[in-house]
Image (tube, coloured by chain):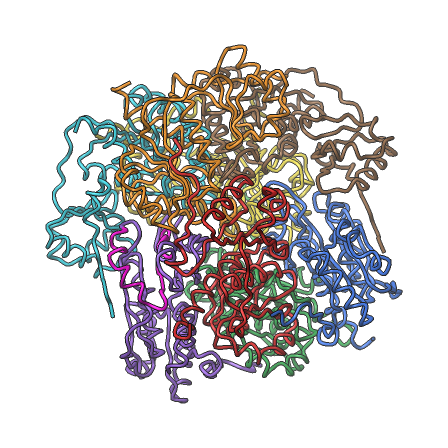
Chain colours: A yellow, B brown, C cyan, D orange, E purple, F green, G red, H blue
Amino acid sequence: MIKSKIIMDFDRYRRCGIEEAVMCEFKSIGQINEILLQAGQQQRRLLLTRLRAEKFNALMPELQPQLQFYQECDCALLGALELPTTAATIAIVSGGSSDANVCHEARLTLNYHGINCDLFQDVGVAALWRLQQILPELQNYDLLIAVAGMEAALPTVLAGLTDAPIIAIPTSVGYGVAAGGNVALLSCLASCAGGVMTMNIDNGYGAACAAIKIYRKINKHST
Amino acid sequence: MIKSKIIMDFDRYRRCGIEEAVMCEFKSIGQINEILLQAGQQQRRLLLTRLRAEKFNALMPELQPQLQFYQECDCALLGALELPTTAATIAIVSGGSSDANVCHEARLTLNYHGINCDLFQDVGVAALWRLQQILPELQNYDLLIAVAGMEAALPTVLAGLTDAPIIAIPTSVGYGVAAGGNVALLSCLASCAGGVMTMNIDNGYGAACAAIKIYRKINKHST
Amino acid sequence: MIKSKIIMDFDRYRRCGIEEAVMCEFKSIGQINEILLQAGQQQRRLLLTRLRAEKFNALMPELQPQLQFYQECDCALLGALELPTTAATIAIVSGGSSDANVCHEARLTLNYHGINCDLFQDVGVAALWRLQQILPELQNYDLLIAVAGMEAALPTVLAGLTDAPIIAIPTSVGYGVAAGGNVALLSCLASCAGGVMTMNIDNGYGAACAAIKIYRKINKHST
Amino acid sequence: MIKSKIIMDFDRYRRCGIEEAVMCEFKSIGQINEILLQAGQQQRRLLLTRLRAEKFNALMPELQPQLQFYQECDCALLGALELPTTAATIAIVSGGSSDANVCHEARLTLNYHGINCDLFQDVGVAALWRLQQILPELQNYDLLIAVAGMEAALPTVLAGLTDAPIIAIPTSVGYGVAAGGNVALLSCLASCAGGVMTMNIDNGYGAACAAIKIYRKINKHST
Amino acid sequence: MIKSKIIMDFDRYRRCGIEEAVMCEFKSIGQINEILLQAGQQQRRLLLTRLRAEKFNALMPELQPQLQFYQECDCALLGALELPTTAATIAIVSGGSSDANVCHEARLTLNYHGINCDLFQDVGVAALWRLQQILPELQNYDLLIAVAGMEAALPTVLAGLTDAPIIAIPTSVGYGVAAGGNVALLSCLASCAGGVMTMNIDNGYGAACAAIKIYRKINKHST
Amino acid sequence: MIKSKIIMDFDRYRRCGIEEAVMCEFKSIGQINEILLQAGQQQRRLLLTRLRAEKFNALMPELQPQLQFYQECDCALLGALELPTTAATIAIVSGGSSDANVCHEARLTLNYHGINCDLFQDVGVAALWRLQQILPELQNYDLLIAVAGMEAALPTVLAGLTDAPIIAIPTSVGYGVAAGGNVALLSCLASCAGGVMTMNIDNGYGAACAAIKIYRKINKHST
Amino acid sequence: MIKSKIIMDFDRYRRCGIEEAVMCEFKSIGQINEILLQAGQQQRRLLLTRLRAEKFNALMPELQPQLQFYQECDCALLGALELPTTAATIAIVSGGSSDANVCHEARLTLNYHGINCDLFQDVGVAALWRLQQILPELQNYDLLIAVAGMEAALPTVLAGLTDAPIIAIPTSVGYGVAAGGNVALLSCLASCAGGVMTMNIDNGYGAACAAIKIYRKINKHST
Amino acid sequence: MIKSKIIMDFDRYRRCGIEEAVMCEFKSIGQINEILLQAGQQQRRLLLTRLRAEKFNALMPELQPQLQFYQECDCALLGALELPTTAATIAIVSGGSSDANVCHEARLTLNYHGINCDLFQDVGVAALWRLQQILPELQNYDLLIAVAGMEAALPTVLAGLTDAPIIAIPTSVGYGVAAGGNVALLSCLASCAGGVMTMNIDNGYGAACAAIKIYRKINKHST
């Protein structure tokens, strides 16, 4: 007998300050439809991650208009997104434009939780002048999310230059030994600069969740 | 020609808010002596990590009395340690007593930077009641450092139960597949709970550095 | 000279209590046709696992009507399935709905051997309340099959809360370090809770075979 | 502040049917002393595993006489061991005499829980006649614990010849590719014979815990 | 300047007793066409391995009729194949029908060099009776090629039962930990039975080359 | 807010003597279009690497005529290529014709920087006579780029026979253990012959960059 | 109850043509003593491998004089060794003098079975002239055992130059990526030259067993 | 019969421009003695690498005075070392003082071949100001050898800032994921900056050999 099918964790926000989200990569179309219907009935917002365009297009036609699809990061939102208007205190900094989808997943997750952020791309350390140019600006943020593939030296260099905590997201950008992002991951974990904390490869969503929890603690008195 | 020998980074505190520290595991006795002499001449404090008792005992006899050795975590301090008196807003939570040395390395590093913390040990998830017993207390902290070996389920369970950011330190406690801490590391990185950030295996010092940067941002207005 | 081609092991039930089954993933259409014809001639039932819908649809048209295809777990049955009517003493418990196909493969294999089971889904430890809600019910089963991907903390948490043996099936659900199920596997093997036994990744069929052998021993006097 | 130090899980037996045990490999002498004192004050029995002779000899002299040390498996017992008198329904079967310590760890753990077992050694598949000689006897047991290193073919061969569930313990016996037991582990997990469940490398204790849980379910009506 | 393009090693037979063969997996259609034209101009026979049907069909139309394509092992032959008429002294023995393509690659390579062999399939050790049934026959061969995937216990069991040298070919048949054939490979290498020699995964061609060299040495006086 | 999007490093030539190049494998069509437009506006030449034909064909139609596409190595050039007329002092030497695309990527990169090179293919060590035939010619070059897959013995053999520095490029040509090029890579790194320097797998572009820097230093007085 | 302790396989010679041997690395002193006593009582010869000098010296004093210890390969023999007087048809060829212990283990095992062999050392391919000097002589042997560490190019080069089957033994000689012999192993397995068969790392004993089986088949009519 | 024992490659200098050197790590004391005697008889100089002090002290007493031992890099020289007097055109640049032994092995090898070099230590990228301070000086060298452990970002940063070719030596300095130097190695190989060539972990000797070959080509007209 099937005793339970899909149980949403809509209580998560109360416990952890993070809204329920659904990772769609390993779910069937039928399962995602069911989740969306359940969320709709309970009038819940929902963030769907790792949802490829083909899968999005295969969802129930009546569900699609209720969703906002973000092609740049394979995400969708059920419910409206109010863009935050406060100044950004979090910066997302990436090594190259190949890392863009991960950056956007993190950005959308932050925005979905009502938190603003700024995005700096293409400042990898192979051309250090690009990083040095924006360094004074970067030093003003409370938190940096560093996104990098290949040998991922960016988080280390950043950590040595600023007093902000660094959440490093290694990306699966790379080939040969770097294929799949493993070198980037190991490089972040082995960083000899203080204050680098590492996420799973391509985990823009998870980095944003950690950033949200830190943001809330920093701003707890003001909100 | 040898153009440069040992160059301390005493400027690090100004840039990053982290004091210079010296990882001793791969340095010769001669190199550590030289570093200590240099720091002494400049009247600097210094934290020495991964310094085994035998190595400590082999340092220059005149240097030893200037150092405080902490056997529980293979660390030593040059200069005095003023224990912080403010209430702890950071908790270190560990799965088992085998993880004690990593907990103490993190604790000492925080204390060395003037930051207080509380330590909860032996609350691994195999006996969940121990964790549930202290959960209400844990929910009051701004930041949790979760230390666990073996399959390291602790950070995941914690992240699902509190709104604090979690810095996970996988430890090298384990045998067979778990030897060296690799399973614990992968388990933390793969955590399906939001807000877990992972450090290198046994990296109590690095976790504390990240905690310091977060702590300073949370408390920037009050200090 | 080809001395032997395909030799079915229809004697297996007598030796081991397990019916012959055919893993189709690496077999050609021609080979599966031949196996089915051979089984048909000998009036044998047969369970086909890891048979994708496209492969099923490419089998000989006259064979297809004799088969029952189970899309939710890529399996097919030659011969009738009598659903067991005794109360379930085995529970399949899964972390998330992404693991559904593995759960169903285990369930079908049990049912095919005349054994009932109950299925509890979406009780992963990131939202521990879902597990705690069904815990009293779970404590009544003789055997638990715990199915989980990512960091797979579920078997460990279950093993610490019940007196039932736990057969853990790590699943290939996950990305980055967790891709392919390796972290889930290692996490189950490294479990610090007593009584967790681990199967190969996604091996719902094998877990069911082990469960059948245990079930028979538990119920040997009553059957 | 240190909020908690060592917390024993003496409630484990009630929840899971398994007594508290202490894995000593990564604990300091001081920690083991403290654990033993705590258990002594509460008049608890305790099983200590992975305790090398040198470490045992370094414990507090007044504690040593209260312990029974088992050199063949690096274990010690606090409290008396009553050897079970019922006929064995569990057999431990090992490939070679190099696996002896793992066999004895499993045997002691079973005995410590009042469960009898028989031990068959040196029946690896390179000399199949040794296994075939004892096969009729092996087919009478309710449960087999198969212990093997190198390529660990024993669990697979056994699983194809009997109707008992098989708990496989891969051992760290081997060199070259087999060093550390990884090949044995993978071989057990990949077994193409039904009913093999795998433990971590050298985990005799854990295999026994799983066997205890199964044993209790099989014998629940008779005890 | 391109100083050399494709240089065939038609001298190989004189040096090593092995005919030139071409592994097509990583060559472009254009390169294979060029090789075939070159061989044709020099009136050479040629064995093409790892040539998928689609690639074969894309070759120059005038070349295709000169080739014999063997779909069961993705091979093609330029030039005629005279089947050997002497009794087989080499046996190819495989664990399951999923390994068929590797068996056929080895068989074709032997036949192409004028050497006969017999093929026994589906005698994996999970059902040992199948192997025991043909054992007396197997003991008459000079050389056994054992082909197996998953945990690949077959070569070990065979090596303990016969006095023939065993060339083991691990196959890529398997999923989870066994995916890609790595467990099968390691299991063969770690074999505790004497006389097992291991080839790369799926390397039926290479195993046949080794068998040819051994065959020639055994039969050097008679030929 | 998006503070920066795509920032080209057109200053690289001045700093390092290497022209900006764009690795297209992980960039979207939109991003490559944007890069080409930006380069066009600034009248810059640009080398695009790892650009599959399908991706090239999907670029903006008005951009395609400005590009020269090189199918043999999945590269494209924006701007004209003046073939160098000086005698080649660099030789690219490859093991087999399967490695051709990597050779051509290196060759094109050298040519793009105005440097000539000669290409010797199909001289792998399995047929050593082919290498020995061209050895006297090879000994005249200033620098050898050795390209090899599988077990990649070529760089080692070359390094023992000439006084030229060797840049080794392992290729992803191979199957089984050699799949993806890992064995070739490790083999180059472990070379027991002096003077072998290793690049990432398939990194023809990077090898050429290193060769360019060495070439410039060798020829600095003459140019 | 302990149903069986140490069971020697003295029947192995009859089945496989290989004498029983004992791998001592993971056996206790007590176990080796027991094995020797058992063999002595049955008046059996015995080869002991992987027996370090310290372990040998710790055996029962009355046993030591009955053994011949071979320090160059950590082996010992119970019973006399009659050196074979027939001309050698097997050659052991090694890359460097660091591989000597593996060569001697293979040589002793062959001699113990009454088979002669010649040993050629220090002919690694980094200095190809050394190999070419002995090539005409090597081409006269029926079988070559190629022993090499690091990148282990020797078996490949040999296989391309002779018509003898090659048994490759990768050795654990190497550091960095080559530590433990893994690169040598992979390199042998990936060899692109026909006729290379690979053993486990450092497995001189196993290579000799395979050679014995091949030798017997080659010489079956003459003996 | 032992046909050859130790064969020195004193011809190497003529072929490759590199003097014979002996890696002592896996050689016995007896073998090293024999090599030194052979070199002495032929009045050859010899560089011994990876020779631990204990091993050096165990060599034949009459040999020791003929050797110069370099404790800082576990090397010894047979024959005199004439320090080069020309200005250095090669710089060795290292991340931290833990890498000192590798730097000195490279330096000694260069000096032994009559080539000067300068050494810059402790300029890792965690404190970028140290690197920037010496950058103008570094830009004057023909060749940089970059030595770094942990995440090894130094070669990448250097390659983006200078026009010199970079030989990267990853070191085994690190713990956790970085233990053994694997992360450093992968990071160098995956470098996104042009012109980084990678050596095996800790291979200071090999890097120097490559540097010697490059140096000779750069200076061929002047010497």
User: Per the image, is G187 magenta?
Assistant: no
Q: Is residue H132 visible?
A: no
> Whole-percent x and y of residue F92?
59, 74
Q: Is residue D130 visible?
A: yes
Q: Please name whichever residue, B87 or C90, is drawn nearer the observer in this view of the structure.
A: C90
- At x 70% / y 65%, what residue is drawn? H210
In magenta, the rendered stretch is E128-155
- At x 38% / y 70%, what residue is drawn? E208
Quarter occupied by residue H3: bottom right
Total residue callouts = 0
- At x 58% / y 51%, what residue is drawn? G67
The reply, left or right, for residue E186 in relation to residue G99 is: left
Q: Please name whichever residue, B148 or E154, is drawn nearer the observer in this view of the structure.
A: E154
> Whole-percent x and y of residue E63?
33, 82
G181 over G83 or under it: above or below: above
Q: Please name whichever residue, H44 or D121, is drawn nearer the observer in this view of the structure.
A: D121
> Whole-percent x and y of residue D134?
32, 41
> Whole-percent x and y of residue G176?
63, 53
